Amino acid sequence: MLYLASDQLTIPQGQGDLPSFAESAGYILGAAASCSDIDRARIFEATERIREILEASAASKSATKDCDTAFLDGLAAGAKAIGSGELDRARAGAALAVLERMIGRERSSTGTGAVRGSDAD
């Protein structure tokens, strides 16, 4: 799969977009999880929000399963991209920040790791 760059990633607009979104989000999170300098809490929060979005958006259990498979494929590919040098740590961190903004889990500007979003305000 050709993974979307973080500046091209958008929230899925229809059922057909969900697996692609799931795989691209997984790629970003897999890469971020492979970077020791990225806070694990950020990765956990973003992963949980992605799961919420996918579960709420999928029209059936089959669609949810397809998204789970795509997400796991993306996680593995993201980790591999960091390991191979295809993606560097700075780009992985920047992509995670974009993903966090998209899904409502943006880090606060204080650097404390707190998140902003509708349920964190």
Image (cartoon, rainbow, N blue to C red):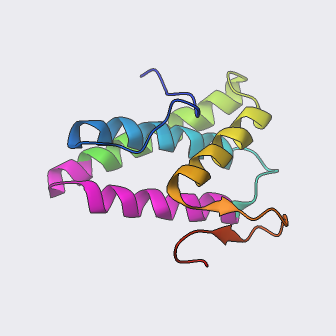
Residue 43 relative to residue 108: left or right: left
Q: Which residues fall within the magenta stretch?
A: 41-65
> Percent from the top left, x then y, of residue 26?
49, 43
67 and 57: which is toward the camera: 57
- Residue under the image location 58 percent in, 35 percent down: 78
Residue 104 in the image: above or below residue 2: below
Between 102 and 45, the residue placed more toward the observer is 102
Whether residue 95 appears in magenta in the rendering, the answer is: no
Most common SS among magenta residues: helix
Residue 72: x %, y % from top left:
43, 45
Q: Residue at x 41, y 22 (%)?
A: 1
Judge whether residue 44 is colored magenta: yes
Tell me what residue is drawn at x 22 percent, y 43 percent: 15
Against 4, residue 41 (above or below) is below
Image location of residue 40, percent across then percent down: 70, 61
Total numbered badges shown on the rendered structure = 0
